[in-house]
């Protein structure tokens, strides 16, 4: 993945993590309020075209099956697209909800690749911590979970790849993060490759059944280590960024 693409995804998912943490302190009034907050979060110059909740097409395009699927938020621009599921319920994202999000976005994906491409990322932004089984399934399917419990994979992958990262963090932890996170942070068109000649879509299975559990362990360890670094060296940076984000959300409400 190019540094520009990773930076965009890391910026969006970091804001989503901060928004989820603010919701843990002050829960959203209802699901629609949470959807509006998530829609505002996607507003940035790299993603000038946005779609809000309530639509049953994706940027006016139907799904391959013709079924009508509601998308909570989406944003696109410069050859990239981010599709978001917003979860405000008190139990956190479940594997059933991850499966449902995958099925409806894959239905749109099958239609989009036939039209010429679908450079999409998928994100679930949850106001409460996701269940372990949901996190495992999301990592397997390339869906990024942003909740209050852990820094998202794109944020950690960007941090692990920085030239000075090994001055502050374990080299073993960083190398494992890069090895395990990169396959899980690919776009849909990189995970489900479309062959226009045969019309087939192929998915490459993980080489190890233990990879997902290893990934979740490294995510937990690196998330804690990176947040500790923020506390020691830049204790106000995330709080200031959260305040700016919430200010944008309130203005848009």
Image: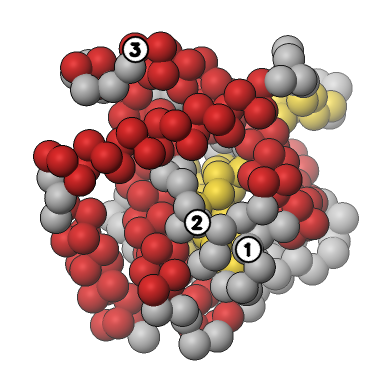
Helix, strand, or loop for circle 1? loop
The residue beneath circle 1 is 92
Q: Residue tagged by mark 3?
A: 171
Quadrant of the image containing the N terminus: top left
Left or right: 68 with respect to 249?
right
Residue 84, horizontal then vertical, whole percent: 56, 58
The label nearer to you, 3 versus 2, is 3
Q: Earlier in the sequence, mark 1 or mark 3?
A: 1
Q: Position of residue 196 (x, y in %)?
A: 76, 26
Is the residue 53 above or below the residue 222 in the image? below
Q: Which mark is residue 147?
A: 2
Q: Earlier in the sequence, mark 3 or mark 2?
A: 2
Q: Residues within 10 Å of mark 2 (few under 14, many from 20)?
A: many
Relative to residue 240, is residue 227 depicted above or below?
above
- How far apart are the alpha carbons under marks 3 and 2? 26 Å
Q: Which mark is residue 115?
A: none
Which residue is at a point 41% across and 19% down the rendered structure image? 173
Q: Are marks 2 and 1 in contact (CB under 8 Å)?
A: yes
- Residue at x-position 50% and y-position 27%: 218
Q: Secondary structure at mark 3?
A: helix
Label whose residue precedes the other's in the sequence (2 or 1):
1
């Amino acid at each position: 993945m190019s540094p520009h693409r990773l930076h965009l995804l890391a910026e969006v998912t970091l804001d989503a993590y901060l928004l989820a943490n603010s919701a843990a302190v002050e829960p959203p009034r209802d699901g629609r309020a949470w959807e509006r907050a998530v829609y505002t979060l996607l507003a940035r110059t790299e993603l000038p075209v946005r779609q809000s909740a309530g639509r049953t097409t994706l940027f006016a395009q139907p799904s391959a099956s013709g079924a009508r699927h509601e998308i909570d938020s989406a944003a696109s621009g410069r050859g990239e697209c981010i599709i978001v599921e917003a979860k405000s319920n008190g139990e956190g994202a479940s594997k059933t909800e991850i499966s449902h999000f995958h099925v409806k976005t894959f239905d749109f994906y099958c239609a989009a690749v036939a039209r010429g491409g679908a450079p999409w990322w998928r994100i679930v932004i949850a106001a409460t911590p996701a269940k372990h089984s949901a996190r495992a399934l999301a990592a397997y399917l390339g869906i990024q979970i942003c909740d209050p419990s852990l820094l998202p994979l794109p944020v950690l992958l960007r941090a692990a790849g920085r030239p000075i990262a090994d001055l502050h963090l374990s080299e073993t932890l960083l190398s494992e993060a890069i090895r395990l996170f990169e396959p899980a942070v690919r776009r849909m068109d990189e995970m489900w490759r479309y062959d226009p000649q045969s019309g087939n879509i192929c998915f490459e299975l993980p080489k190890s059944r233990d990879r997902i559990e290893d990934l979740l362990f490294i995510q937990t360890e690196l998330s804690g280590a990176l947040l500790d670094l923020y506390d020691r060296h830049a204790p106000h940076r995330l709080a200031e960024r959260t305040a700016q984000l919430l200010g944008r959300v309130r203005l848009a409400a």
